[in-house]
Structure formats: C-alpha cells, structure tokens
Amino acid sequence: LPPVFERYQVGSNFLVNYWNSLISLSLIIVGVGLLMLTTSTTKKYKTINFISSKLLSIFKWDLLLMLFCSSVGDLTFYSYLDFQSNKFNSAASVISFLFALGFNVCFFLLLIKTLKIAYHSHKNKDKISPESIASNPVLDLESFGFLYIDFHNQSFSQLAFMFYFLCRVYLFNIIIATLTIFPIMQCLLITGLTVLMLLYLIIKRPMKKTWDLIYLIINELIILIIDICVLMIAMSSAQDPNNPNRSNENLSLQRVIISCNMVFSFLALASVAVQV
C-alpha cells in the first residue's frame, strides 16, 4: 500500500480513515461528560443520582474501553499508513499525524494499565470479586472490569489475556501495513502470531467460561487454516505465477478460505445462541 500512495503522490489520512470510530468515541465521551454533570448536580434527588451514577460507571470506562479495543485494528493499520505516507504538506496532514500519534500513545497507556492490574492482582493473591475490588481503590479495578473480569486469576499470564490479545491485534496490523512488498514474510509472521496465541489459549486457559475458551480456540484454529492457505498462495505465486496448475491450486485454497469465513459466521451465531 505505501508504494501505491507514493506512485500517486498522495498520503493516507488517519482522521479520514478512522472517522467512524472517532465519532463513536467522541459521542461516548460527550455522554460521559453529561452524566458526570448530571451526577454532580442531582445529589438531592437520590433516584436520578443513583441512575446517572450507575450509567456513568458503565459508560466512563467499560463501554469506552470496549469500543476503543474493538477499533485497535483500524487504529493501528490506518495510523501506520499515515506514518509511512504522510507528506506534512498541509495543516490537515499534520493534524492527522498528531491524532494518529496520540491514539497510539493512548493504546500503549492502556497496555500499561492492563499489565498493572494483572501484576498487582497476582502479586497480592486477591480473588477478583466485588469484595476485593472495594479493597483496591488504588487500582480502581471497578472502572476497568472489561480488562480482567472474564479471566482466571491463578496466574499473571491468565489475567494478562487482554494484554496479549491487544498486542497480537496491534502487531498483526503493523505487519499488514508495513510489509506489503514482502508477502511471504507477512504470512510467516502472521502465522507465527496465530500459533503463539493458540498455544497460549491451550496451555494457560485464561477464560473463566468453558464455552468462551472453546470458542476462542476454534476461532484460532480457523484463522490458522486461513493463514496457512494464504502462505501457500503467496509462496506459489512467488515461484511461478503464470503456471496454470498453480492457478488451479490457488483457486482451491481460495475456496477453503471462503469456507472458513462462512464457518466464522456460523460460529459467531452459535456463540450468541449459547450465551443467551
């Protein structure tokens, strides 16, 4: 992708590409501000104050974190495209770069917070529960339940699941955005990330709910099949792209990838059905 931007002498604009997620995050931040104002001005009205404070606890971090974490892939991909192709020839390009840099800093701060929660919870040997949350005001665990609540706390590596997961997403998108002229290296690195995540899930079993663990392992197995197919296509295309036999082999691999994507969809529906 960066060579394409270079060829047409244009740059990728992070703000334009990340706009939808940015608007959603902005709306939540505005909502948090309004709820904070409502909570602080309705102390005399207990019912309204109770409702607004509960909504604030949900919106302030958990919902914001969920939305931010779900957009980490787009954030990484578009920011690194911006870093590589930005010409810094206008105010818009400079602002786009600063926003991209700022969001990456926020991401790394989130990683540090995730590690801090996992480390202190493991070090203190506390069971993460409403009682232990109340006894750890310094960590402010109640505000960051999304980062730890669904994971076992017998070991640091279990509690740090979100750290590993977010790092995997971040690295995956860096590889996609920066190594476009090295497709085989891309495929090898991405396959390696999938294997590492699969081994982590099988060995550490971080999820509290058995179905969640099974769902993630099946997901990773499907991703691994896709990764291997893409790697085989990249290697065969690099060896002899004009060979008709290789074209037929690639077509078969492409069908496998399509089938895997269909399984993804059915698996997601099954997961929703099980949760209900």
Image (spheres, grey):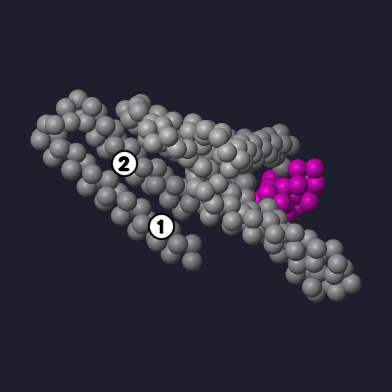
Q: The N terminus appears in which quarter of the rendering?
A: top left
Verify whether residue 266 appears in magenta. Answer: no
Mark 2 = which residue?
Answer: 226
Q: Is residue 103 visible?
A: no
Element at badge 2? helix
**Alpha-carbon distance for marks 2 and 1?**
17 Å
Residue type beneath disc 1: Ala
Q: Position of residue 12 (x, y in %)?
A: 48, 40
Residue type beneath disc 2: Ile
Give the residues in magenta. 127-146
Verify whether residue 140 appears in magenta. Answer: yes
Q: Quadrant of residue 186?
A: top left
Mark 1 = which residue?
Answer: 268
| Left or right of 59 on screen, residue 177 | left
Q: Is residue 140 visible?
A: yes
| Left or right of 184 on screen, residue 37 | right
Q: Which residue is drawn at 10% across and 35% down?
A: 244
Task: Count the labels in the image.
Answer: 2
Q: Which residue is drawn at 47% across and 37% down?
A: 11
74 or 112: which is nearer to us? 74
Q: Where is residue 117 in the image (x, y as percent from the top left)?
A: 69, 40
